[in-house]
């Protein structure tokens, strides 16, 4: 029964697109043909609140001219060198991440990756000479539930746009954890502990890695992944996320 449904969905999806033309995922306004490579209209897209410099030298949050490190980073230690984030987690980007992650709106992957690539180029992140882009992996149980890893889709597109190597199968998630968003800050570190492992540590030895994720909140997940990379003697680890919480 399920197989018939899948086949029918494959056959009729293009027809459904014809009958029900694409509308903006945010305001539902009809999208002209030319803008259909982005499922969000120009007016909504421009409402994305970009994260602007000066950036905290650790987490990447916007700081005042007189600070180099934000208040919360003064009492924190991360296992990666520095994080950069493209947008502030509010309004349109918050809604888009939700649609992308939980509502199967994978058509967003190109435009969101383009936003990350624009940031990468604007702030000249190529100066860090990355050997690999690495997407934060999902545990297989969660991958089965969701059917795709939204961060992997973003990273695949970024790798094509930037011409950088992609490593998808080395960093693995070996522990099925409670979603970090459901936990308070002090519990997140314990929840994520031991969640990652490397299949082939030698692949990353002496390499510069850019870890990619959709959202940075406390940094606990990226720190735990970075810890595993450090054990493989990587050179430098940086993090790039699509959004960062205030
Ligand atoms: Zn719109
Ligand atoms: Zn900070």
Image: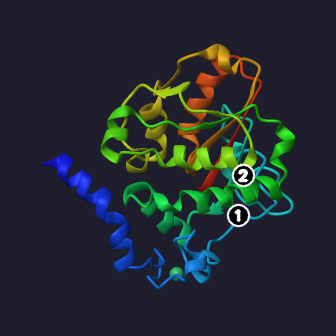
Q: Position of residue 89 (x, y in %)?
A: 57, 63
Q: Which mark is residue 51?
A: 1
Q: Which mark is residue 199?
A: none
Secondary-structure class at tag 2: loop
Residue toward you, 29 or 209: 29
Q: Is mark 2 within 8 Å of ligand 2?
A: yes
Q: Position of residue 153 (x, y in %)?
A: 53, 48
Residue 246: tell me if it is visible.
no
Residue toward you, 175 or 96: 96
Q: Identify the image quadrant of residue 76.
A: top right
Work out whether mark 2 precedes mark 1 in sequence or the reverse, and give the earlier one: 1
Q: Farthest residue in the bottom direction? A: 29
User: For the residue carrying disc 1, how many other residues have a C-alpha within 10 Å: few (<14), some (14-19), or many (20+)?
Assistant: many
Q: Residue at x 57, y 68 (%)?
A: 37
Q: Residue at x 47, y 85 (%)?
A: 30
Residue 3 to residue 231: above or below? below
Q: Residue at x 54, y 38 (%)?
A: 136
Is 147 positioned to the left or the right of 43 in the image?
A: left
Q: Position of residue 29 (x, y in %)?
A: 47, 86
Q: Identify the image quadrant of residue 21.
A: bottom left
Q: Farthest residue in the left direction? A: 1
Residue 99: tell me if it is visible.
yes
Q: Residue at x 48, y 49 (%)?
A: 150
Q: Disc 2 designates what residue?
A: 60
Residue 149 to residue 117: above or below? above
């Amino acid at each position: 029964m399920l197989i018939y449904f899948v086949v029918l969905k494959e056959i009729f999806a293009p027809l459904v697109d014809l009958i029900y033309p694409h509308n903006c995922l945010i305001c539902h306004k009809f999208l002209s043909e030319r803008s259909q490579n982005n499922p969000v209209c120009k007016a909504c897209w421009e409402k994305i609140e970009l994260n602007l410099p000066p950036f905290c030298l650790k987490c990447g949050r916007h700081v005042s001219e007189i600070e180099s490190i934000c208040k919360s980073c003064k009492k924190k230690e991360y296992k990666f060198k520095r994080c950069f984030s493209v947008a502030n987690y509010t309004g349109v980007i918050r809604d888009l991440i939700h649609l992308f992650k939980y509502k199967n709106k994978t058509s967003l992957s190109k435009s969101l990756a383009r936003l990350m690539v624009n940031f990468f180029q604007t702030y000249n992140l190529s100066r860090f000479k990355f050997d690999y882009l690495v997407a934060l992996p999902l545990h297989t149980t969660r991958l089965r539930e969701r059917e795709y890893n939204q961060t992997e889709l973003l990273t695949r597109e970024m790798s094509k746009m930037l011409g950088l190597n992609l490593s998808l199968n080395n960093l693995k998630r070996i522990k099925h954890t409670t979603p970090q968003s459901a936990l308070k800050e002090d519990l997140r570190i314990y929840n994520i502990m031991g969640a990652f492992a490397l299949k082939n540590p030698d692949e990353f030895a002496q390499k510069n890695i850019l870890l990619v994720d959709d959202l940075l909140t406390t940094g606990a997940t990226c720190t735990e992944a970075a810890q595993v990379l450090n054990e493989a003697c990587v050179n430098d680890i940086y993090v790039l996320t699509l959004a960062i919480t205030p």
